[in-house]
Amino acid sequence: MSDKPIYVTQPYLPPLEEFIPYLEQIWESKFLTNGGPFHEQLEKALCEFLGIEHIALFTNGTIALVTALQALRITGEVITTPYSFVATSHSLLWNGIRPVFVDIDPNTLNLDPEKIEAAITPQTTAIMPVHCYGHPCNVDAIQKIADNYNLKVIYDAAHAFGVQDAQGSILRHGDLSVLSFHATKVFNTFEGGAIVCPDAKTKLRIDQLKNFGYVNEITVVAPGINGKMSEFNSAFGLLQLQHIDKALSKRKEIDKVYRDRLKGVPGIRCMNKAGEKVANYSYFPVLVEPDYPISRDELNQKLKGIGIHPRRYFYPLISNYPMYRGLPSANRENLPLATIAAQRVLCLPIYPDLNLSVVEEITTFIKLLTKQTISSTEHHR
Ligand SMILES: *Cc1c(COP(=O)(O)O)cnc(C)c1O
């Protein structure tokens, strides 16, 4: 198929020579971190691009999640999804908070709002949903529950860069939204992250928390952390942002080829749009259902055999990791739909530099397996 292995994603890198002037500026100013000029410019540029008012940049998405919980003084129990990257729940443990897992909606694979209320206890202080694969959560239903029970909502929006619903950025929902700019994400700064905040006062508190709790040269008001994004990463983000539209449209093309060519393949279900007006095509998950001739894991192995490396995002469920599986809410019976999703989902390669011919070969291979296996079973009869 291809000489080099094809991975599920590959970071998008602008031409190196375009980055040199940024580096020269850093070398000249000797401003390396602590809210330098590139940091400030990137915050402005991201607010404009994303259509939001306030953002605080971070060294990575996980420290941003940990800090978001601190900023809102969240304690006790937080309701969250087991169907996510492990950092979602880890950010709770780092704050001494107990995660309470609630099952997902089988169509969106996001936290099912209908199951949240039953999990609320007197210790519950917040809900931490994830816009999984960039598909928006049912934000209205979640907000209604939060209002009724006086809970905060922090969205793990690590997959949702640039996603919009009919009214605007998906990041305006909840009390805070957290982004990741890790190398594997749609928009990357090598490592990086951010908290989207509703007002300047919240941003100020978050900016203090990410800088050890310093308010001024001699005053420290909280046990803050070092979560600052450096000038190197900020500069790279500014450059990336100049290429983001092109990168997103390439992803959109790939998404379309997958959808067109996998349509009607028995046992392969592509996920539908979940209410986004503008999608970011960050992932291409398919569900390998029981009527596909082989299991998800077998398909995964067969694809690896031809040099294609999809990923089983998200398997295992967070609730199955050792530090979580003892929790009452981690019980399989409590999470039947998340358990099924984790058994069936396979994320196929999608990234701007992925050749459309490779996408065509992947889909042909997936289709061919249905025919081959059917004819071989017929042969045995
Ligand atoms: C990537 C990711 C994170 C963590 O972000 P980092 O920047 O890698 O720390 C958190 N949650 C989800 C859902 C992610 O995909």
Image (cartoon, grey):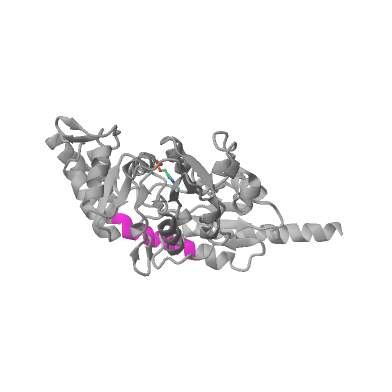
The percent coordinates of residue 195 (x first, y second) are: 32, 48
Magenta span: 243-256
The percent coordinates of residue 306 (x first, y second) are: 60, 47
**How many numbered marks have been drawn onto this rendered protein structure?**
0
| Residue furthest out toward the top | 218
Is residue 184 among the parts visible in the rendering? yes
Task: Please state which of residues 139 and 36 is positioned toward the viewer in this rendering.
Answer: 139
| In the depicted structure, whether residue 118 falls above or below residue 211 | below
Is residue 302 among the parts visible in the rendering? no
Taking the spot 29% from the left edge, 52% from the top edge, the residue there is 197
Taking the spot 60% from the left edge, 57% from the top edge, the residue there is 287
| In the depicted structure, whether residue 354 falls above or below residue 211 | below
Q: Is residue 147 left or right of residue 301?
A: left
Quadrant field for ligand 1? top left
- Which quadrant of the rendered structure holds the C terminus? bottom right
The percent coordinates of residue 349 (x first, y second) are: 50, 52
Tell me where residue 28 sits by quadrant. Answer: top left
Taking the spot 30% from the left edge, 37% from the top edge, the residue there is 227
| Residue furthest out toward the right | 381
| In the depicted structure, whether residue 247 falls above or below residue 39 | below
**Residue 254 within the magenta-colored segment of the rendering:** yes
Taking the spot 21% from the left edge, 51% from the top edge, the residue there is 200
